[in-house]
């Protein structure tokens, strides 16, 4: 049985998902309040990390 996939999102996709400005997502990634990985010069965010960030209320 294959485990469920936790998709990677770009900051632009994450911003669109939660309806915030993409700069909010970038700021959270740089400030480490949103767990993200930097691949080269690109940020990648796991959906589960985005959900956890929303649950903390940090996006408000």
Image (spheres, grey):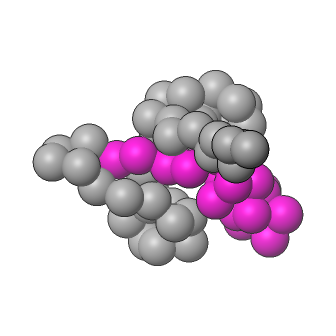
Residue 57 vertical placement versus 48 (above, below): below
Q: Residue at x 28, y 55 (%)?
A: 38
Q: Residue at x 37, y 58 (%)?
A: 37
Left or right: 47 in relation to 1: left
Let me know if residue 26 is in the magenta part.
no
Residue 24 vertical placement versus 19 (above, below): below
Residue 14 is drawn in which quadrant? top right
Left or right: 54 in relation to 49: right
Q: Nearer the viewer, residue 55 or 20?
A: 55
Residue 18: percent from left, percent from top: 73, 37
Q: Which residues are magenta?
A: 43-60
Q: Quadrant of the C terminus?
A: bottom right
Q: Total marks drawn?
A: 0
- Asked whether residue 22 is in view, the answer is no
Q: Nearer the viewer, residue 6 or 24?
A: 6
Left or right: 12 in relation to 21: left
Residue 57: percent from left, percent from top: 81, 65
Residue 7 is drawn in which quadrant? top right
Q: Quadrant of the N terminus?
A: top right
- Asked whether residue 58 is in view, the answer is yes
Q: Residue at x 52, y 66 (%)?
A: 35
Q: Residue furthest front?
A: 1
Left or right: 29 in relation to 2: left
Q: Residue furthest left?
A: 40
Q: Residue at x 68, y 43 (%)?
A: 2
């Amino acid at each position: 049985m294959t485990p469920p996939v936790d998709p990677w999102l770009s900051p632009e996709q994450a911003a669109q998902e939660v309806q915030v400005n993409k700069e909010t997502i970038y700021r959270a990634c740089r400030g480490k309040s949103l767990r993200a990985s930097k691949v080269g010069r690109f940020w990648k965010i796991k959906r589960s990390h985005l959900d956890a960030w929303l649950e903390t209320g940090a996006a408000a």
